[in-house]
Image (tube, rainbow, N blue to C red):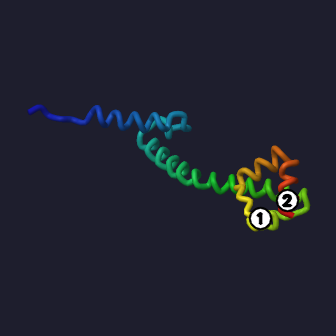
Amino acid sequence: MPRANTRVASRNRRKKVLKAVKGYWGRRGKLLEAAYDASKRAGQYAYRDRKVKKRKFRELWIIRINAAARENGMSYSEFMHKLSVKNIELDRKVLAGMAVEDPAGFKKLVDSVR
C-alpha cells in the first residue's frame, strides 16, 4: 500500500492563512507563525466589533433623535415615552432617519404626541 502524506492539505492550510493576512504590516503578513497570531487576533476583534457596531449605531440614533426632539421643545425620554403611550411603533433607526432627512415630518410627529 502506498504511503499517504498530507503535503497538499498542509500547503493549502498555510496558503489560506497567508491569504487572509495579505497586506498586514511586516512579518505578520509574510511569516506563518506571526500570520497565525495576527489572523486569530483579527478574528477576535471582528467578532467583538460586530456586536459593538450595533451598540454604536443605537447610540448615534439616540443622539440624533434627542437633538431633533429638543429643537421641537421636548426631551428624548419624554418624546419616547409619549410615543409608546400613543402606541406609535417606530424604531430608533427610522426616527433618526426622519430627524435628519425630514425635519418637517419629525416636527409633525412631535406635535402629534404632544
Q: Quadrant of the N terminus?
A: top left
Horizontal side of 48 relative to 74 (left or right) equals left
Where is residue 38 shown, x and y percent of the image?
49, 45
* Amino acid bearing label 1: Lys
Residue at label 2?
112
Residue 105 is tagged as none
Which numbered disc, 2 or 1, marks the residue that appears first in the sequence? Answer: 1
Q: Nearer the viewer, residue 101 or 47?
A: 101
44 on left or right of 66: left
Q: Residue sitting at 53 percent across and 51 percent down?
A: 47
Image position, residue 50 (x, y; %): 57, 51
Residue 82: x, y in percent? 79, 66
Q: Which residue corresponds to mark 1?
A: 86
Question: How many neighbours does mark 2 have within 10 angstroms: few (below 14), some (14-19), or many (20 or more)?
Answer: few
Q: 59 or 9: which is nearer to us?
A: 59
CA separation in Å, label 2 and label 1: 9 Å
- Dot 1: what SS? loop
In this rendered view, identify the residue nearer to me: 45 or 60. Answer: 60
Q: Amino acid at mark 2?
A: Ser
Q: Are marks 2 and 1 in contact (CB under 8 Å)?
A: yes
